[in-house]
Image (spheres, helix red, strand yellow):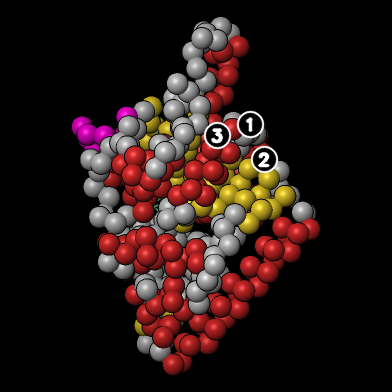
Amino acid sequence: MSGNKVIKNLKSFSTAAERFEGSHVLCPGCAHSIIVREVLNATNDNLVVSASTGCLEVCTAIYPHTSWDCSWIHIGFENSSTAVAGAEAMNKALRKKGRIGADVPEPKFVAFGGDGATFDIGFQWLSGCFERGHDMMYICLDNEVYANTGGQRSSATPIGASATTSPAGSTSYGEKQNKKDIVQIMAAHGAPYVAQVAPNKWKDMIKKIHRGFDTKGPVYINAMSACTTEWKFAPHETIEVSDLATDSLVFPLYEIIDGTELNITYRPKNIVPVRDYLGAQPRFKHLFKPEYEYLIKEWQERVDAYWEYLQRREEARV
Ligand SMILES: Cc1ncc(C[n+]2csc(CCOP(=O)(O)OP(=O)(O)O)c2C)c(N)n1
Ligand code: SF4
Ligand SMILES: [Mg+2]
């Protein structure tokens, strides 16, 4: 049976290891594996998957073992997008020539990349794929740091986070730049579907992945991926930290259709203060010193302003 999978309950959805086996060496508590399983378990279709170099790739393909029970391409740090776009173009061409018959079901094409691969080093490749309009889904596992190589900052690292190349210390509060707004940048390509998801909000995630798979053309999904090692929380706290991320609106969940129509897909009943989210992660612990308290206040103001902006965009439909 092909197409989107009907999800009966969380247990069967989250534990089915049909395409992504448990046999990997991602850190205990790593959200990457939760997200990948949520995506792959959402469909019955055949898949062609690529993964750029990063934690996901190195931890799931240690020769001669693999965690992937589907077609899987490991490619350079920068070009999981183009690897899958090439496969998608080849599929089209071979079907046109009759070398793949109409009886062979159409696969789905999915590329995974970390934030370093997506926001920084693979950005021009990704942008090209979206401009050319390939029929593919690109999923960024956004843990806001180059985790695989030891926690260097990326352009997804938020202000005030301590990373190995922007460490907090006696003269620094850590990262100085604000995080790049990749969701809006990808929507500005006019892509038919762009969304932000989080693994703790799995029903919202499934809806968006289903919609993405039903969309013709390039789909961008930004997946918040809490990293126990670099965000420095305990492995059993992944979902708790993810809840704080979505409920403080630091990671608002929304979608943008055809580059214009914006829908907020999750409105927390109780919005929690940004300081609770920051306080749960020792990468921000220095911000609680009296001299840096102003940064927490600024964080809250930024998050409030962005939430208002999203609501205005939703109402205005532009
Ligand atoms: C062109 C190139 N530059 C740098 C590297 C080294 N490198 C491999 S993985 C990685 C970090 C990956 O970070 P990210 O994409 O955020 O994925 P994560 O490991 O955080 O999931 C780096 C810098 C590389 N393999 N190729
Ligand atoms: S370092 Fe972070 S992203 Fe990498 S495997 Fe560990 S928890 Fe996952
Ligand atoms: Mg990363």
Which residue: 43% across, 33% down?
Answer: 49
Height in image: 1 above or below 219?
A: above
How many residues crowd around disc 3 within 10 Å: few (fewer than 14), some, or many (20 or more)?
many
Locate residue 208, reporting x and y percent: 55, 44
Kindly identify which residue carries mark 1: 216
Q: Amino acid at mark 1?
A: Lys
Left or right: where 317 falls relative to 295: right
> Which of the image's four quarters has the N terminus?
top left
Task: Report helix, strand or loop for mark 3.
Answer: helix
How far apart are the alpha carbons under marks 2 and 1?
8 Å
Which residue: 40% across, 47% down?
Answer: 35
Locate residue 48, reporting x and y percent: 44, 28
Left or right: where 231 falls relative to 138: left
> Which of the image's four quarters has the C terminus?
bottom right
Nearest to N terminus: mark 2 or mark 1: 2
Q: Which mark is residue 111?
A: none
Q: Which mark is residue 213?
A: 3
Kindly identify which residue carries mark 2: 192
Residue 122 in view? no
Residue extent of the magenta highlight: 61-69
Instruction: Look at the magenta stretch and give its main secondary structure.
Output: loop
Task: Report helix, strand or loop for mark 2.
Answer: loop
Left or right: where 136 falls relative to 313: left
Q: Residue furthest left?
A: 64
How far apart are the alpha carbons under marks 1 and 3?
8 Å
